[in-house]
Amino acid sequence: MSDLTEERNTASNPESAPAGAGTPGVDRGDRVHEFHGEGVTVTWSRRRCIHAAACVMNLPKVFAPGRRPWVDATRAPAETVAHVVAMCPTGALHGARSDGGTDEQPPTENSVLVTRNGPLYVHGQVEVRDDSGAVRLVDTRVALCRCGGSANQPLCDGAHLASGFRDAGTVHAGAALGDPIAPRATLRAQPEPQGPLVLEGPFTLSGSDRRTTLLGSAARLCRCGGSGNKPFCDGTHLREGF
């Protein structure tokens, strides 16, 4: 059986075992699809994919929606495939090298990008927790909901597109992020029950135009979609019953 046939079976098998939060890049309870190439294995989470299309735009011969399987990692060198996989802003795609090449490493600084009409893109050493405080996901790339509509909170599931969420993604100079001297290198993202997303750890926060970047180690960010002070929480979730 060829690698490509194995990929089809793995990607379409609904009984594949869910992975746990101990696996870097894998959401607790998620089911990932594997696609094997020469020297690289690509994994894809349908649940975390919001069709940002960075993979399709940069390597269409490997990533082709509508083809079965839609990922064919044999169509490009392992280094090229791994490079493009690392462009996925949501972390839905990951790559593991088996040719001796270096796997993706987290950047030395954590960053949070407020996208226009969309989620927060987080890049770095990221730890996502659930409402109870339990670790749900450890990754280098994560998309976090800020429209209030995701059914996969606090992760983005693309609900902002269906709901027509609109926000320019502006970050104003002078906004407080807490003490820039952070106690740890990991950036922890934890939602408060029916409340904002709390970030703790060293990070930079940039607006969609990338003209304003703030440095800090703590922030309470809106995830109900209603704050008048986006991306920060202003307590609107209390009035709207989020």
Image: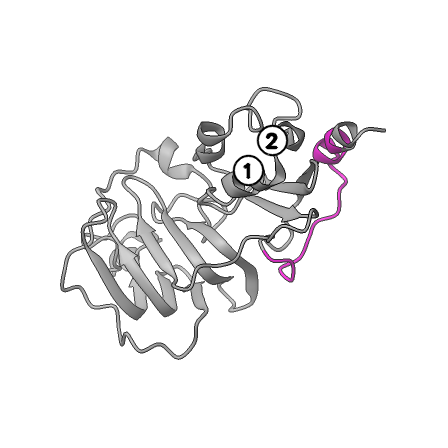
In the displayed orientation, state which residue is furthest to the right: 1
- Residue 222, image quadrant: bottom left
Residue that appears at 65% across and 52% down: 29
Identify residue type, mark 1.
Thr
Q: Nearer the viewer, residue 48 or 24?
A: 24
The residue to which callout 2 is attached is 76
Mark 1 surroundings: few (<14), some (14-19) or many (≥20) residues within 10 A: some
Element type at mark 1: helix
In the rendered view, tell whether residue 163 sits above or below residue 125: above
| Residue 194 percent location from the top left of the image | 39, 59
Residue 48 in sight: no
Residue in the foreground of this view, choosing between 83 and 223: 83
Residue 177 in percent (x, y) is at 25, 68
Q: Position of residue 154 (x, y in %)?
A: 45, 53
Q: Does the magenta segment cover residue 21? A: yes
Q: Which residue is drawn at the image coordinates 24% and 50% (left, top)?
A: 207
In what quadrant of the picture does the N terminus appear?
A: top right
Amino acid marked by disc 2: Ala
Q: Which residues are magenta?
A: 7-24
User: Dominant secondary structure of the magenta stretch?
Assistant: loop
Q: Which mark is residue 80?
A: 1
**Residues under numbered marks 2 and 1 in contact, where contact means CB atoms less than 8 Å apart:** yes
The answer to whether 91 appears left or right of 45 in the picture is left
Residue 20 vs residue 185: left or right? right
